[in-house]
Amino acid sequence: MRKKYTIVVIPSNSSKTRRLSITRAMLILLVFGLCSLAGTTLYLAQERVHTARHLAKLSPLENQNQTQKELLEKFNAKLQSLDNNLIQLKQQEEKLRIMASLKPGKEKDDLGVGGVSKDALPEGLEKLAPSEQRFIRRLNRQFQDIEKRTTEQESAFKDLLRAFRDRSILLAHTPSIWPVKGWLSSSFGYRRSPFTNRREFHAGIDIVAREGTSIFAPADGVVISDRRAVGYGKILKIQHMQGIVTSFAHNSVHLVKVGQRIRRGDIIAKVGSTGRSTGPHLHYEVRINGVAINPRLYIVE
């Protein structure tokens, strides 16, 4: 016969008692259940505390990640700005080479050399997420490219500096500044005539400015012509070295005379609207041995 245990239940608001008879197996099962329930409760309480601590640490990490992301984006924008500056420097270099009669700069051939070495990458990169790794690798490639181009540009400008020192007199006679402060209204080359509406070749550039605005000599030279011409109105011409002649038309008044030597930056005339003109502006030409050249090729300002 199985041994049984009796559990007496005494209600707090009654004098009657209740008796429950259970077997030993049932008692063991009950005790085991109570212990399991207590253990589970204790485990869940510990997990709750752990989760709360983890969440408390997670919030600052999210803010830190957001800050890092913003810094990386700003860094990327800065690299893009540096890239644009290098492009502008390259354009300036080509203009200076034209002035110094140097051959265009050659691009260095780096075929067969590529990729990024493991040593060149920041430490701990493998700990980042894949998207962050790709972003860091791309920034690193951009940085290396800009570093390489900066070194090449520095070398190119050193070569130009030596050339300028050797050609200082020649360069002083090369037109290189805007002859008047204004805005460009008509470029060099073929255009639609504002008078006949026909296609015609425009041998210079037109710069709109208020009447009476000062016109500056773009280089050292000698005044060789001061007269009126059909269509051009009052026109002034300056002879420079190497067959370069600059012309300034539609002027209101001339402040220099034929045979007078001038220096770059001297005021030579005032803007007007003489001759065939739709309004006050300067028609500016650059010719080499009589052949019209785009003046903007020489302007480095």
Image (spheres, rainbow, N blue to C red):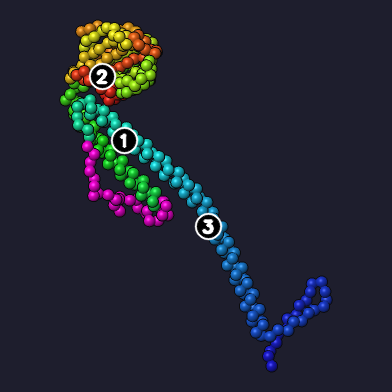
For marks 2 and 1, the one nearer the N-term is 1
Which quarter of the rendering shows the N terminus?
bottom right
Magenta segment: 106-132
**Number of the label disc, if any, that sits on residue 54:** 3
- The chief SS type of the magenta part is loop
Which of 172 and 240 lies nearest the eye of the viewer?
240
Vertical comparison of 258 with 54: above or below: above
Would you name the residue on which mark 2 appears?
286
Residue 256 position (above or below residue 172): above
Q: Secondary structure at mark 3?
A: helix
Rendering coords of residue 181 (x, y %):
36, 17
Q: Residue at x 22, y 10 (%)?
A: 224
Along the viewing direction, whichever of 224 and 31 lies nearer the viewer: 224
Secondary structure of the residue carrying tag 2 is strand
Measure the alpha-carbon separation of dots 2 and 1.
29 Å
* Residue nearest the viewer, comparing 277 with 245: 277
Disc 3 residue type (three-letter): His
* Amino acid type at mark 1: Leu
Q: How many angstroms separate mark 3 from mark 1 (CA)?
A: 47 Å
Judging by the rendered image, the residue that carries numbered circle 1 is 86
Decide whether residue 111 is among the magenta residues.
Answer: yes
